[in-house]
Image (cartoon, rainbow, N blue to C red):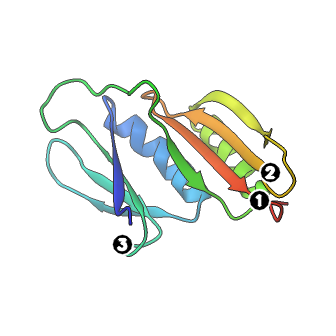
């Protein structure tokens, strides 16, 4: 249902370096960059799958993050959660909660790692369920 989510940045080159690393760890890449002052850039594994857009704000005002706003990235395994979290840390992200199990009711295990990009946008890389190994 979701085509893409958009996040604002105040430092486009730094943001693109960060997302090249993090989205690359997910097997994605830059799919499109608009040649305008905003630099609207789409990342993903294909245009027929959910994507993430990074851009300077359309109104020219500073980008800011929302309190309580987060983008959750579904992973295929706990190993992939760990790899994406590590890529985020190595690319200049900040820790919001290292990968680990949250909750624990049988069959409902939630394994997630939380981080922020250099602009402060919050993410969770997660795997849920008993097959999360």
Q: Position of residue 16 (x, y in %)?
A: 40, 45
Measured in 3D between alpha carbons, the distance from the residue under mark 2 to the one under mark 3, in whole angstroms, is 31 Å
When the figure is inspected, residue 85 is found, relative to residue 60, above or below; the finding is below
Q: Element at badge 1?
A: loop
Looking at the image, which residue sits at the far bottom?
A: 48
Q: Position of residue 99 (x, y in %)?
A: 76, 40
Q: How many marks?
A: 3
Q: Position of residue 101 (x, y in %)?
A: 81, 42
Measured in 3D between alpha carbons, the distance from the residue under mark 1 to the one under mark 3, in whole angstroms, is 28 Å
Q: Quadrant of residue 64?
A: top left
Residue designated by label 3: 47
Residue designated by label 2: 109
Q: Element at badge 2?
A: loop
When the figure is inspected, residue 23 is found, relative to residue 49, above or below; the finding is above
Q: Nearer the viewer, residue 52 or 69?
A: 69
Q: Earlier in the sequence, mark 2 or mark 3?
A: 3
Label of residue 129 in the image: 1
Q: Residue shown at 15%/42% (left/top)?
A: 37
Q: Quadrant of the C terminus?
A: bottom right
């Amino acid at each position: 249902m979701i085509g893409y989510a958009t996040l604002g940045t105040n430092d486009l080159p730094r943001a693109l370096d960060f997302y090249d690393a993090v989205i690359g760890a997910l097997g994605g890449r830059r799919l499109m960059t608009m040649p305008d002052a905003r630099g609207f850039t789409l990342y993903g594994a294909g245009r027929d799958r959910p994507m993430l857009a990074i851009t300077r704000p359309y109104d020219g005002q500073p980008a800011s993050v929302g309190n309580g706003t987060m983008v959750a990235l579904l992973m295929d395994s706990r190993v992939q959660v760990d790899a994406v979290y590590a890529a985020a840390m190595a690319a200049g992200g900040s820790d919001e909660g290292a990968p680990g199990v949250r909750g624990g009711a049988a069959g409902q295990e939630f394994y997630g790692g939380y981080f922020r990009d250099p602009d402060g946008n919050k993410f969770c890389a997660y795997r849920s369920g008993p097959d999360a190994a």
